[in-house]
Each structure stands twice: as structure tokens, then as C-alpha cells.
Image (tube, rainbow, N blue to C red):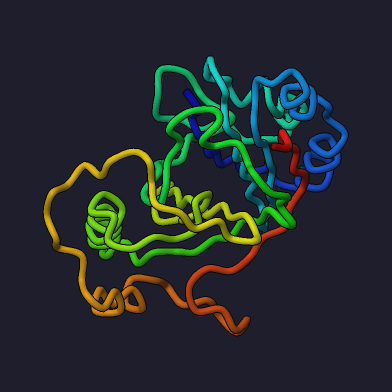
Amino acid sequence: MISRKIYRGIWKEGQAADGLAALQEDSAAKQLVEEGKLMTVAAFSWQNNVFLYYECTGTEIEPALVAGTAGPYLIDWEGEAAPRKWIEMIDVFHFNEPAGYEHWLRKAAVERRGGRVAHLKREKAASYIYYHYQLQEERAFHGNKYDIIAMHENLLFGYQEFPSVVEEPVVPGRLNTTGTPVPWEDSRMDLHFQPWEDDGYLYFKPVETVFAYYIEG
């Protein structure tokens, strides 16, 4: 069974450049793909943040095995029994989910893999999750098969692939309700986001790709 993982790390002060250089030179992620243990793995950078997205094909793999060379440059996160270099972000929305290896394997060439970020208004986090879970599990409408949005605190990180692959999910939805607003615009997502200052982006904005490796179908 394919499991999708998204992690967030923060560089130590003044260590971002060295950390990114170490991450770019690290061969571990590529090797895990070549061994078939990961179907897709990508890293993204934004300000002092670094994000990992990867798909385990069997046993779940810890981020230290995917991007271990970045560890010395990352701050420690408190809040659990032991400090962590990587915080696992919470999956808050996806149009589709893996039903198995063959279902999730890309059937056509991927031209681009991208990451994007947005900030929710903190008082709107519950509403954002509420509306998106309804949409997701009611299968209200379909979107890019490989899109996923994850959250840590009020920061959203989204992974995308282009061109879009839009198909009906194989896994049945978990709700039998019909509560998703029609049209979707009635959910007023425009009221959920903190506006970006002076850069032209209203909701999500793209971030830099550090690397991307994947099994070709």
C-alpha cells in the first residue's frame, strides 16, 4: 500500500544555504527511488523552511533516511518525547488517494512537480478543514489526482503535479452526506487566507523545488 508523507523542517539561523547544498548533494532519496522503496520523492524550499514530500511503497520510511544530510542544519522541534528535526504535516485535503501500487503509478510523463504555501487565518483553520473534508469524502467534484494539501500550525503546504490527471477516485468516500456548497465558491475560501504582502498572490504561492525523483510508469 502506498503511504504519502509530508514533512516540514526549519533551518538554523544562517544555515539555510549550507543545508540546501547538503540536501542537493545527498543521494539517499534518489537511491530509495531506484530501490523501489519510494515511488516519488521531492524537496522544496521557502524562506527558512524546507519541505519533504514522498510516497512509500511498503514500509514507512523516516525522513532522516530520505534527507539525513540536512539534519545538522535543522532546528530541533520540541513537543514529543524526543526532539525532532522534521515535523510531520497533517493531510487536510486530497482529491484522490492510493488504492494500490498500480493505481498510483504515473501512466504518463510528469512535466513538472511543484510545491506551494499559504497561511490560514488561525480562526479559520477549523472551517477550512470542515469544508475540505466534506468535499474530499463526499467526492463532490474531481480534481488533480496527485494534489495534496498538508498543514502545520496555520501554514499550508501543497504538492502538485502537471499536467493534471483528473479521474474518479477508486477508494469510496467516507461520507454519505451532500453538504459541500454548490457552487464551491459559496464556501468563501477567500475569507480563510492571510493575504500576502505586495507580491500579487492571494492564496497559495509557489516555492522553489530542490529536487524531485520518481519511478516512471
Q: In the image, is 113 to the left or to the right of 160?
A: right
**Residue beneath the point at 36% across and 49% down:** 92
**Residue beneath the point at 57% across and 23% down:** 57
Q: Nearer the viewer, residue 175 or 192?
A: 175
Q: Nearer the viewer, residue 217 or 80?
A: 217
Quarter assignment of residue 189? bottom left
Quarter assignment of residue 35? top right
* Image position, residue 176 (x, y; %): 13, 49
Quarter assignment of residue 91? top left
**Residue beneath the point at 30% across and 79% down:** 185
Q: In the image, is 127 to the left or to the right of 74?
A: left
As drawn, the residue found furthest toward the top would be 59
Numbered label tally: 0
Figure quadrant of the C terminus: top right
Q: Eyeballing the image, is 157 above or below 203?
A: above
As drawn, the residue found furthest toward the left would be 177
**Residue beneath the point at 69% across and 21% down:** 36
Q: Nearer the viewer, residue 187 or 172?
A: 172
* Image position, residue 156 (x, y; %): 46, 56
* Image position, residue 181 (x, y; %): 20, 71
